[in-house]
Image (cartoon, rainbow, N blue to C red):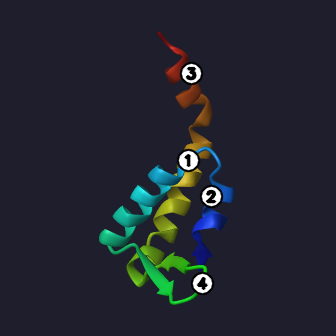
Amino acid sequence: MVRFGELRKQLPEITPKMLTQQLRELESDGLITRTVYAEVPPKVEYRLSELGSTLGPVLDQLAVWGVAHHEAIVRQLAQP
């Protein structure tokens, strides 16, 4: 589980508005769950849903592919 502020710290380049939009979309798609606690100040936690957790192996393989092809991708992007 992770809170919004923790995500902001881990992703400093994303605006709060964009992070909120992405979290709403992931929740709508069933990939994360959002739990709101009745506290002051408000507390909201996000976690991967059962469906979202099945993406782990897919993302691991995507990362392996990215590392294996990094140089070719950089060369391609550098071309005019």
At x 63% / y 65%, what residue is drawn?
A: 5
**Residue corresponding to mark 3:** 75
For the residues labelled 1 and 4, the Cα–Cα distance comes to 26 Å
Q: Amino acid at mark 2?
A: Arg
For the residues labelled 1 and 3, the Cα–Cα distance comes to 26 Å
Q: Nearer the viewer, mark 1 or mark 3?
A: 1
Q: Nearer the viewer, mark 3 or mark 4?
A: 4
Q: Mark 3: which secondary structure?
A: helix
At x 30% / y 70%, what residue is drawn?
A: 28
Measuring from the top left, give residue 57's x and y in whole percent.
50, 69
At x 43% / y 64%, what residue is drawn?
A: 23
> In this picture, is 22 found above or below 30?
above
Say which label, 3 or 2, has the lower sequence index.
2
Q: Which mark is residue 14?
A: 1
Measuring from the top left, give residue 27's x and y in whole percent.
37, 71
At x 56% / y 45%, what residue is drawn?
A: 66
For the residues labelled 4 and 2, the Cα–Cα distance comes to 20 Å
- Callout 1 touching callout 4 (CB < 8 Å): no
Q: Amino acid at mark 1?
A: Ile
**Residue corresponding to mark 2:** 8
